[in-house]
């Protein structure tokens, strides 16, 4: 299990390859990557992700441990950035390794659902019209009831 | 006790962190105390359903007890991922 | 949409990075990678994947087009190998790009479920005890009823 | 018409492909014709529920018509991915 909270960019290709290669007895590897895209109304120039330094690492580790206790997993990787990002940059990734694909998929979805609504990150979008905090979506909170 | 504010809660209150002494028994009591202090607190805490709270860096709810607590943080619903 | 059927190994890290980087207006990228693991009873030395050359490419393209028509996707990638593979080698990968993560996840699971049971590949495992065709699992056929 | 065999069907029948002329109207008729030819066909086709068929490179079922068809393939359930 590896959980990284960092300001720097990460190399998705290298992380994905290293994660997948490290588990030759796991048949199924799933990755999810979140990319900064333009805001729904357009015109976003950059995004700043604020976080709660004392809590972030622990919160992500708790979520990752939860996933490991619920599904038969060989490994979990979580990387989440904070600070300033531009459209097209990668915000975060999770990866799961399991013997069977259903476990790898479900655990990755669980990680994403919890990370969205339970890890202390807040996004603010900056554009020509000013700045705005991204509002949490009801559907993200509702997604937790699946698990 | 340290009290931390994040995202728009931080912006409305105007500071990221303060240290205070309180007799409040629960998070809710602390919120009521802060709301009486200044208008900016009253505005930030006007709708608790729009806020989340962590006590000693664990998510909890506004009924949580403050006995022995070292750090309370207030913030809007998270938007990571 | 890109569908590749090939005997050679593919570079998962490079493919994943290129796929994710090519879609800066898609917020969510999901990849699934299948890795050769030892057989359930152990002792597998190599696997040979037979396929139906005239049909494979078309079958995979049909499955990929189905995914694109069912979910709001920015792109789909499917790579599947045939021929001889050793434990730890990657058999195949799919990748999906979407604005929203639920679409990216569901489409990737759909692709895997159909690819497992509807694309003309057959695995044979070779070990010290001889060779055996991998039997299709009822649960793989049942998985199709989800969609 | 070309008839193709894959995986253990190919192994049991002993050849990957043959070209034949048939009056069979459906895949099922063709299977019956083949089973009468030789023991190895009878063995390979003994349990149709364990087999799949593609006609002109599209998956179909054993009731499919053979009129105008150029290629029929028999194989076990797929195990890719």
Image (cartoon, coloured by chain):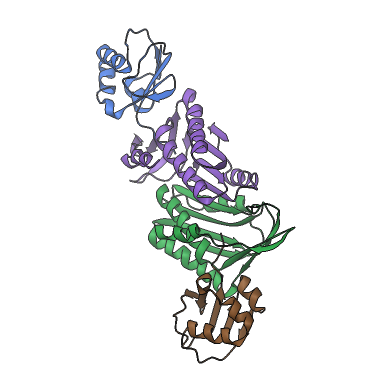
Chain colours: A purple, B blue, C green, D brown
Question: Going by the picture, which residue comes out furthest to the right?
Answer: C128
State which quarter of the image contains the N terminus of chain A: top right
Can the viewer see residue A49 in this picture?
yes
Count every numbered label the image shows and give the total.
0
Q: Residue D20's x, y, as percent?
A: 59, 89
**Residue at figure coordinates x 39%, y 13% from the top left:** B18
Q: Residue C30's x, y, as percent?
A: 49, 50
**Residue at figure coordinates x 51%, y 76% from the top left:** D54
**Residue at figure coordinates x 51%, y 33% from the top left:** A65
What is the quadrant of residue C121 in the picture?
Answer: bottom right
- Up the image or down, B53 lies above or below C51; here it is above
**Residue at figure coordinates x 46%, y 53% from the top left:** C97
- Up the image or down, B57 lies above or below A26; here it is above
Q: Residue D68's x, y, as percent?
A: 48, 88
**Side (left or right) of C140 relative to A42:** right
Q: Residue B29's x, y, as percent?
A: 29, 14
- Up the image or down, D11 lies above or below A26; here it is below
Can the viewer see residue D1 in this picture?
no
State which quarter of the image contains the C terminus of chain A: top left
Residue sitting nearer the eye, C54 or D78? D78
Residue sitting nearer the eye, C36 or C140? C140
Residue sitting nearer the eye, A103 or A89? A103
What is the quadrant of residue C69 in the picture?
Answer: bottom left
- Up the image or down, C120 lies above or below C146; here it is below
What is the quadrant of residue C89 in the picture?
Answer: bottom right
């Amino acid at each position: 299990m590896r959980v990284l909270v960092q300001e720097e960019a990460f190399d998705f290709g290298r992380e994905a390859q290293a994660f997948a290669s490290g588990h030759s007895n796991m048949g199924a590897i799933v990755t999810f990557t979140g990319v900064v895209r333009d805001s729904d109304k357009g015109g976003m120039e950059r995004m700043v992700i604020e976080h709660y330094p004392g809590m972030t690492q622990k919160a992500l580790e708790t979520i990752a441990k939860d996933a490991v206790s619920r599904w038969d997993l060989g490994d979990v990787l979580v990387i989440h950035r904070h600070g300033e990002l531009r459209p097209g940059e990668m915000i975060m990734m999770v990866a799961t390794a399991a013997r069977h694909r259903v476990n790898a998929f479900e655990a990755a979805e669980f990680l994403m659902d919890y990370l969205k609504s339970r890890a202390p990150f807040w996004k603010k979008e900056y554009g020509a019209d000013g700045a705005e905090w991204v509002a949490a979506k009801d559907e993200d909170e509702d997604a937790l009831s699946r698990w | 006790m340290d009290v931390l504010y994040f995202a728009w809660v931080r912006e409305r209150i105007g500071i990221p962190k303060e240290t205070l002494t309180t007799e409040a028994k629960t998070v809710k009591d602390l919120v009521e105390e802060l709301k009486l202090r200044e208008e900016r607190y009253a505005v930030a805490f006007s709708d608790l359903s729009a806020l989340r709270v962590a006590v000693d860096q664990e998510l909890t709810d506004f009924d949580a007890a403050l006995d022995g607590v070292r750090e309370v943080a207030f913030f809007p619903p998270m938007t990571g991922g």
